[in-house]
């Protein structure tokens, strides 16, 4: 939850006129002590009333909204803050005339809150009332727990943040509560948003790739917050990850060249071969999932029958994985004669062993690998690795429960696990 402060503009300062007497001495008609804004706040207890707070000794119901109302016609509310003992603020809205404030985000159950109400009277003098109260604990023990990913560490600028829920959330209003409670803070700051991949998984990414050498902190404020009927927020371990340099590798299947950029500077161009007709490499933006020095690649794992003209069973070195279904950038010494001039692979991007070693040593998990000008299918969004960046920012925002528009009809599902390999 984010803090929302509602402050009215201060009244214009009291005018002070300078009087000049015959002797030339200057005196003022008023002083700072006469300015009502300079006075200590008076006790505003008589100017306000509360709804949602119970009588002394009883705990407030966290499922009911908190309402503060200005009493009478001699004062108005200028500001309200409600914060619990852990520092979580309650959002709210203040009427334009200062007559009423009400909470717009739920209170936590079993928490202690400090409510501070600021007022002013018709003369502009400030008032204040501070109230402490406790909320009751929920009767239910059903909790929604969250696990953030990836693991703490340093990644490339294409790595999204993932939130895994331990039970499904389908209702949009409940999803909105969950999403508001999942906080992502990047330094330097960037615009970003969550996307509901399915009922139990969310991805968070910025509009563009993460900044290079950024720090990204992720935490949940959902604990003890009511999400739905008989469902409250549970625990979530905070996560901090960092990014390295901005490394983007672009493979042009038409020119048979892979070009590597570091922080937008071209650092290497490598002749390659990509998928031949019938086995074309996927077009689009992919993200490095893992690096494996050695992989045994068999054609039978991708549906090619043993003994056919396309069958293979080969040791492969310096393999950089970009899809779970088996697309790699790897050493392919058997196709050096075609690298830079023809596409002869079964879907992977092949290069010489020295070039593959260089690529392997200079690429990292989370770095971006993009394929252009291939006749292959577009990269899957979520089912076969990290294809998040293939959605436009507008469509990505539609995947948020906080979006006003209709969600995009993007394919959904959980990532598959390590399985077939292709050459």
Image: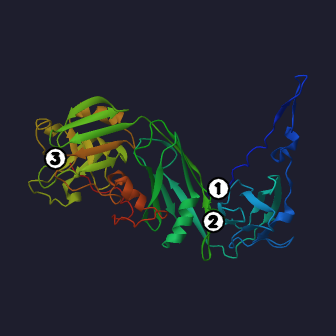
Q: Spot the residue most to the left.
A: 309
The percent coordinates of residue 133 (x first, y second) are 80, 64
Element class at badge 3: loop
- The number of callouts visible is 3
Give the residue drawn at x 16%, y 39%: 256
Give the residue drawn at x 32%, y 33%: 261
* Vertical arrangement, residue 126 with respect to residue 156, above or below: below
Q: Nearer the viewer, residue 200 or 60?
A: 60
Q: Nearer the viewer, residue 64 or 296?
A: 64
The percent coordinates of residue 226 (x first, y second) are 63, 69
State the residue position of label 2.
Answer: 104
Sequence-earlier tag: 2 or 3 = 2
Q: Nearer the viewer, residue 36 or 334?
A: 36
Sequence-earlier tag: 2 or 1 = 1
* Vertical arrangement, residue 153 with respect to residue 182, above or below: above
Quadrant of res 75: bottom right
State the residue position of label 1.
Answer: 4
Element class at badge 2: loop
State the residue position of label 3.
Answer: 345
Bin the neighbour count of mark 3 within 10 Å (Cα to Cα): few under 14, some 14-19, many 20 and up: many
Alpha carbon of mark 2 to alpha carbon of mark 1: how far? 10 Å
The percent coordinates of residue 221 (x first, y second) are 62, 58
* Vertical arrangement, residue 84 with respect to residue 371, above or below: below
Alpha carbon of mark 2 to alpha carbon of mark 3: how far? 57 Å
Q: Nearer the viewer, residue 114 or 301?
A: 114
Marks 2,1: beta carbons within 8 A: yes
* Vertical arrangement, residue 184 with respect to residue 22, above or below: below
Query: Would you say residue 166 is visible in this rendering?
Result: no
Marks 1,3: beta carbons within 8 A: no
Give the residue drawn at x 13%, y 44%: 343
């Amino acid at each position: 939850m984010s803090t929302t402060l509602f402050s009215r503009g201060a009244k214009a300062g009291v005018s002070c006129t300078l009087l000049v007497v015959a002797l030339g001495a200057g005196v003022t008609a008023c002083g700072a002590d006469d300015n009502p804004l300079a006075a200590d706040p008076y006790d505003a207890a008589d100017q306000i009333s509360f709804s949602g707070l119970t009588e002394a000794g009883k705990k407030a119901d966290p499922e009911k909204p908190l309402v503060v109302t200005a009493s009478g016609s001699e004062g108005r509310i200028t500001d309200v803050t409600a914060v619990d003992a852990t520092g979580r603020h309650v959002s709210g809205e203040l009427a334009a005339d200062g007559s009423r404030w009400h909470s717009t985000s739920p209170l936590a159950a079993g928490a202690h809150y400090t409510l501070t109400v600021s007022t002013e009277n018709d003369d502009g003098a400030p008032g204040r009332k501070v109230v402490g109260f406790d909320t009751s604990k929920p009767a239910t023990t059903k909790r929604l727990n969250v696990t953030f990913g990836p693991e703490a560490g340093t990644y490339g600028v294409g790595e999204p943040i993932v939130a895994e829920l331990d039970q499904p959330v389908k209702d949009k209003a409940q999803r909105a509560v969950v999403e508001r409670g999942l906080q992502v803070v990047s330094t330097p700051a960037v615009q970003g948003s969550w996307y509901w991949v399915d009922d139990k998984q969310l991805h968070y990414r910025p509009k563009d790739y993460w900044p290079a050498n950024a720090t990204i902190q992720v935490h949940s404020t959902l604990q003890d917050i009511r999400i739905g009927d008989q469902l409250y927020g549970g625990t979530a371990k905070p996560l901090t990850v960092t990014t390295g340099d901005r490394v983007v590798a672009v493979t042009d299947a038409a020119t048979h060249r892979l070009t590597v950029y570091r922080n937008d500077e071209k650092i290497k161009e490598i002749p390659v071969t990509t998928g031949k007709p019938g086995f074309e490499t996927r077009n689009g933006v992919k993200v490095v999932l893992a690096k494996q020095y050695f992989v045994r690649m068999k054609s039978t794992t991708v549906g090619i029958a043993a003994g056919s003209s396309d069958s293979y069973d080969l040791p492969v070195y310096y393999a950089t994985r970009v899809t779970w279904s088996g697309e790699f950038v790897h050493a392919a010494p058997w196709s050096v004669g075609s690298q830079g001039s023809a596409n002869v692979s079964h879907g992977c991007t092949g290069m010489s062993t020295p070039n593959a070693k260089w690529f392997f040593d200079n690429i990292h998990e989370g770095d971006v690998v993009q394929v252009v000008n291939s006749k292959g299918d577009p990269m899957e969004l979520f089912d076969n690795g990290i294809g998040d960046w293939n959605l436009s920012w507008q469509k990505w925002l539609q995947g948020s429960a906080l979006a006003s528009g209709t969600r995009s009809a993007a394919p959904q599902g959980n990532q598959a696990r390590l399985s077939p390999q292709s050459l």
